[in-house]
Amino acid sequence: MKIGNREFTYGQGHVYIMGILNVTPDSFSDGGKFNDKDAALFHVEEMVQQGADIIDVGGESTRPGYQKITVPEEIERVTGIIEAVKKRFDIPVSIDTYKAPVMDAALAAGADLANDIWGLRYDKFYAPEGKTSVWDCGTMAQIVAKYDVPVCVMHNRDQAVYQNFLEEVLLDLEDSIAIGEKAGISRDRMILDPGVGFAKDYEQNLEILAHLKLFERFELPLLLAASRKSVIGLTLDLPVTEREEGTMVTSVLAGMAGWDFVRVHDVEKNKRALKMLEKILEKDLQRKNKCVNI
């Protein structure tokens, strides 16, 4: 899959790092630290040097109880940063938004990957009666199709009510894929994210992490975005500033399950953990191949 000017292969035992850049004053983990352009660019430089493969820009917090902002305000926050990052660094940039007008502006500003926390389904849940979209510019799926960029489709739903939790998550993701394909996004342009922390309680988030292999059935690239989230904080009884070890465990879990991307705040630590894992798995594969050839 090509994202920006880079080719990403999946299913090859390598985990790519998506580094988080929140240009928001109220993000749950690093709110206010990088909403100044100079600070944001300095942090991008740090993440690039530490081995990030993609920079994910977000202009509105989606933590529980977050303060919603207007579309023009979010556009103003993200477009200048995207343009500056693309001008200064040779790295793909993704835009994290569920608002189609923001996605439109961000992709026009040069973003290479759409990252939608509603999995192309926000319009399905919230469009006014008789309309297909919440937005005048069209649905999220239509905007992504217009720019012909890859999209990260995250699991989410309007109500966290399930009869068969894991099976319904898988069915919801199939629905997202179908919405994308209907709008003209080819299946091979999609990355799937199970949505840890969204429309799920603590036990359900743990269940996702315990069953990562289930998502192999899609035969698509998979992204895990569990960095510093409440499932880690509740498990370890730690504040958001002390959840990095727990995050690294989830990154290693993703690598062991054959996943392709992790979205993290601390690029350096997670990169080191995954490098160690990959070296061990490489050695194990060599041993298995040697046994087969004896």
Image (cartoon, helix red, strand yellow):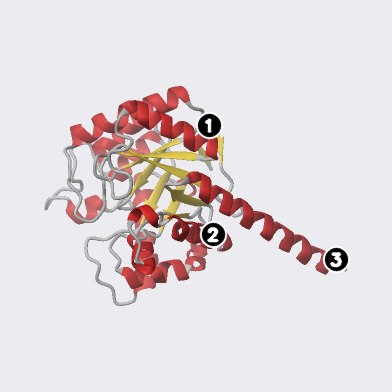
Q: Nearer the viewer, residue 69 or 29?
A: 29
Marks 3 and 1, how far apart at CA: 39 Å
Image location of residue 231, percent across then percent down: 36, 64
Residue at (28% x, 73% y) in the render:
162
Give the image location of residue 237, x and y in percent: 34, 66
- Of helix, strand and loop, which one carries label 2? helix
Which badge, 3 or 1, comes first in the chain's sequence?
Answer: 1
Label pair 3/1, CB-CB below 8 angstroms: no
Pointer 3: residues within 10 angstroms few (<14), some, or many (20+)?
few
The answer to whether one can see residue 109 in this image is no
Labelled pair 3, 2 in contact (Cβ < 8 Å): no
As measured in the structure, the alpha-carbon distance from the residue carrying label 3 to the one carrying label 2 is: 29 Å
Which residue is outermost to the bottom?
163
Residue denoted by label 3: 293
Q: Mark 1 or mark 2, which is nearer to you?
A: 2
Toward the viewer: 39 or 91?
39
Secondary structure found at label 3: helix
Badge 1 amino acid: Asn
How packed mark 1 is, by other alpha carbons closer than 10 Å (few <14, some 14-19, many 20 or more), is few
Which numbered tag is attached to residue 5? 1
* Residue 247 appears left or right of 159: right
Mark in front: 3 vs 2: 2
Residue in the image at 45% along x and 61% along y: 246
Query: Type of residue at label 2?
Result: Val
Front residue of this view, candidates 216 and 57? 57
Reading the chain from its start, which is encountered first: label 3 or label 2?
2
- Identified by mark 3, the residue type is Asn
Q: Earlier in the sequence, mark 1 or mark 2?
A: 1
Q: Secondary structure at mark 1?
A: loop
Residue at coordinates 49% horizontally, 48% vertically from top-left? 188
Disc assigned to residue 252: 2
**How far is the residue under mark 1 from the one under mark 2?**
27 Å
